Image (cartoon, rainbow, N blue to C red):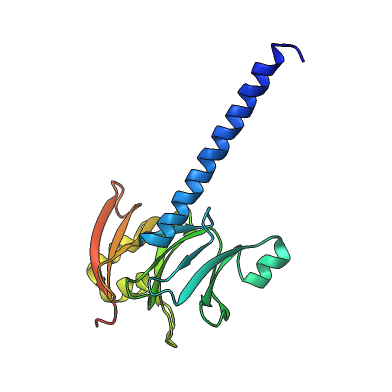
């Protein structure tokens, strides 16, 4: 081998090792965050599952592989709920674009922010271990907060849950813009589950 070839090989090899190290560090950080710190986790993404704080349930994301698989899932992607002890798994929610999920501190509820379109998003709350339909917070706001009805006339409307305050209270952010609010708007609310 010529003496000039060896430094080039070492340079390529060192770049490869550096990139490998950076990717491994990023993946370890992502897995550590999902495992240790309650934060909004986006699916699809690097991390494909998140365990409830009580360790009893796991939410995993499945991406469709083709059109037939998407039909079977009910969308381009689906969230599945698995019992950590029995390993029983059931489909929780199908979605098209992307979602964020966040377990409640007691692991009995799961917040899902569905970014269903480029111009809207809405939050759902699933009660685990209860035969309840998912709670659509956008629908609740539309029905109970008539004073904010103009917000729903905007063509860009994003409603997202950002954090669990406790087991029954969520911090909700509503923002967007459109015909009713051309300069945009942003509101923050505390939403209490089960409050009439």
Name the foreground residue: 25 vs 189: 25
On the image, the x and y values in percent for residue 108 come to: 37, 78
Name the foreground residue: 183 vs 126: 126
Considering the image in quadrants, where does the C terminus appear?
bottom left
On the image, the x and y values in percent for residue 178 come to: 35, 52
Considering the image in quadrants, where does the N terminus appear?
top right
Image height of 64 relative to 53, above or below? above
Image height of 181 relative to 140, above or below? above
Q: Quadrant of residue 73?
A: bottom right
Which residue is painted at 45% across and 68% down in the image?
51
Which residue is painted at 57% across and 39% down in the image?
20
Name the foreground residue: 23 vs 136: 23
On the image, the x and y values in percent for residue 120 come to: 43, 58
Name the foreground residue: 96 vs 26: 26
Image height of 2 relative to 149, above or below? above
Which residue is painted at 65% across and 62% down in the image?
64
Residue 103 as seen in the image, left or right of residue 87: left
Which residue is painted at 35% across and 62% down in the image?
38
């Amino acid at each position: 081998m010529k003496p000039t070839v060896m430094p080039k090989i070492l340079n390529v090899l060192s770049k490869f090792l550096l990139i490998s190290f950076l990717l491994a560090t990023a993946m370890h950080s992502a897995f550590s965050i999902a495992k240790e710190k309650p934060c909004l986790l986006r699916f699809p993404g690097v991390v494909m599952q998140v365990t409830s704080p009580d360790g009893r349930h796991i939410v995993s994301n499945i991406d469709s592989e083709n059109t037939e698989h998407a039909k079977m899932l009910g969308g381009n992607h689906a969230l599945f709920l698995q019992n950590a002890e029995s390993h029983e798994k059931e489909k929780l929610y199908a979605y098209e674009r992307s979602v964020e999920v966040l377990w409640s501190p007691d692991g009995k509820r799961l917040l899902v922010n569905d970014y269903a379109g480029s111009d809207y998003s809405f939050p759902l709350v699933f009660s685990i271990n209860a035969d309840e339909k998912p709670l659509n917070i956008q629908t609740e706001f539309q029905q109970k907060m008539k004073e904010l009805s103009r917000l729903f006339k905007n063509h860009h409307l994003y409603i997202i849950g950002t954090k669990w305050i406790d087991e029954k209270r969520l911090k909700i952010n509503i923002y967007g813009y459109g015909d009713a609010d051309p300069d945009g708007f942003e509101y923050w609310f505390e939403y209490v589950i089960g409050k009439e």
